[in-house]
Amino acid sequence: MDYKAYIAEKIKANVDMDLEEIMELIEIPPKADMGDYAFPCFKLAKVFRKAPNSIAEELKTKINSEGLERIENLGPYLNFFLDKSVVAKEIIEKVLKEGDKYGSDTTGNGKKVVVEYSSPNIAKPFHIGHLSTTVIGHSLYKILNFEGYDVVRINHLGDWGTQFGKLISAYKRWGNEEALHSEPINELLRIYVKFHEEAEKDSSLDDEARMHFKKLEDGCEEETALWDRFRSLSLKEFSKVYNMLGVDFDYYTGESFYNDKMDAIIDDIDKKGLLEESNGARVVMLDKYNMPPCLVKKSDGATIYATRDLAAATYRKKTYDFYKNIYVVGTPQALHFKQIFKTLELMGNEWAKDCVHVGFGLVKFQDRSLSTRKGEVLFLEDLLNQAVAKTLEVINEKNPDLEDKEDVAKKIGIGAVVFAYLKNNRERDIIFDWKDMLNFDGETGPYVQYTYARGKSILRKLGYGGEKIDYSKLNSKEEFELIKLLGAFKDAIESAIDKYEPSIITRYVLEVAKAFNKFYNSYSIANCEDEETKNARLKMVEATCDVVKNALDLIGVNVVEKM
Ligand code: ARG
């Protein structure tokens, strides 16, 4: 039930105001002991020609309080207290009935949403910066899917560009077949670094690389075969990380996919009269919009990153007829996307307004001891493995006899990293710190997962409370706070979609876990006053577990039954 609307109706019966206006005025009081909803009477002062305080006093006696616990007036405010047992029954029964569907909806109505995320660069390590786009995008997919959108997941791999000329050249000179086989990314990185070192001394290497890239663009057999190999070896490495995270894609249409689709775009830009020359290059001028020009063709005729994005957006519109086209890419590329979206708009595409750049901040280290395998780059795979190993240490210390320790450590360790990445507003930089992340008592993944496992263990021990439940037994402040939070899952989801912000779900589930633990630390379930109280509390525990599980799933974190 929409309690706010229910209260608004009651107010409406006594004042001459639209329901909508009343709804807008109703607030949630800052403190729980001030009621569940409050209505300020300032606006009524003119109509009633009375002070707001006396209006509140008068309305309090007039408004029908049936179905509510009580109405109070505090200064110029009317405070409404919901009937706790009615609310508890309604919310808990709804959660338990809907189970893993609780919070889901059909509001998306099958509308197509393209979400592009991860998009690492081939032949380069998958580093910790790429984890942000991967987990934010994956979570947005989960959330949108849960609300009934039809999501197309795209990995726009960085699999084309002049660097492949360098790699081919380097491989032909110094490549080690065996190493490429056993540790492909390391080997590709090694020869790439070597190429740059050698090219400093001998600039003819750059010409050689350009020649190989030209041959690659022309489809020459040897170059194409090498490129193809680098690409599939990289993808195989990346998929290890994706598997660990449970992340998936519908298409791996990377930059190379648009090679044959760019002439048409450039022609189109030209036909629309937007193409201009600047120092031999072809650009779209955007100075009217306070932006530097969007470069579509370099002076040597090569197409570039931006051109591929123009082609990609156009292809996606044609292929998926999207309602929204979302790019989860770091905030440093904000200007690039502004230029792309503006250029698409100038080309007459009214759908340019449906393209959204979802940016995010940087990842910084707190702990310098985070070991790196090779020099500067920290491999994401290593980082996730470290998280799992550290979690296993904790388990071995705290609960050495736990079943399936390895599996539990995986879910908690990886969950901890994902949770830390999605905890704060995505625009904010992330300070990476093991201690914070794996703290079982902090605002962490393990803390929330532990709450779930604790709930499950209570249910295993004490049962599920049976059929006949007296919800009026759930009458403490702590219980009511928790139950109201369980009822607010939907609001959190809606606002997460609205702002493209998974952290709203992360924050929400943290609040639920905190509210549960506050209850759990103040009241006993096993040794209750009476059997009815115990049964009602067990239902509440079960509903809490359901909500925590659904919410964690939306941010891509698994639960464990025991830990
Ligand atoms: N591969 C790029 C990088 O790692 C990100 C690609 C972003 N997506 C796009 N459509 N431009 O920086």
Image: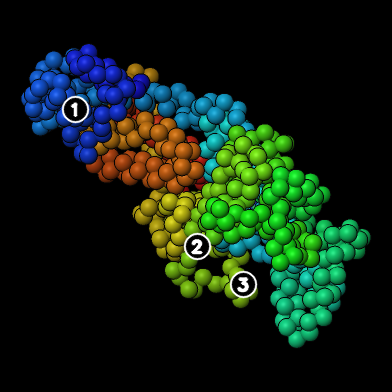
Q: Point out the tag, 3 or 1, that comes first from the N-terminus.
A: 1
Q: Position of residue 41 (x, y in %)?
A: 16, 27
Nearest to the observer: residue 301 or residue 393 = 301
Q: Any atom of ligand 1 within 8 Å of the CB at mark 3?
A: no
Q: Pointer 3: what residue?
A: 373
In whole angstroms, how far apart are the C-alphas of marks 2 and 3?
18 Å
In whole angstroms, how far apart are the C-alphas of marks 1 and 2?
48 Å
Q: Point out the tag, 1 or 2, that comes first from the N-terminus.
A: 1
Q: What amino acid does circle 3 point to?
A: Arg
Of the residues tagged 3 and 1, which is closer to the observer? 1
Q: Is residue 69 left or right of residue 263?
A: left
Ligand 1 position by quadrant:
bottom right
Circle 3 SS class = loop
Q: Which mark is on residue 101?
A: none
Q: Are marks 3 and 1 in contact (CB under 8 Å)?
A: no
Q: Which mark is on residue 43?
A: 1
The residue sitting at 57% across, 40% down in the picture is 353
Q: Quadrant of residue 483?
A: top left
Nearest to the observer: residue 345 or residue 105 = 345
Q: What amino acid does circle 1 point to?
A: Lys
- Vertical position of residue 73 compared to residue 252: above or below: above
Q: Pointer 2: what residue?
A: 363
Is residue 233 visible to the viewer in this orientation of the structure? no
In whole angstroms, how far apart are the C-alphas of marks 3 and 1?
65 Å
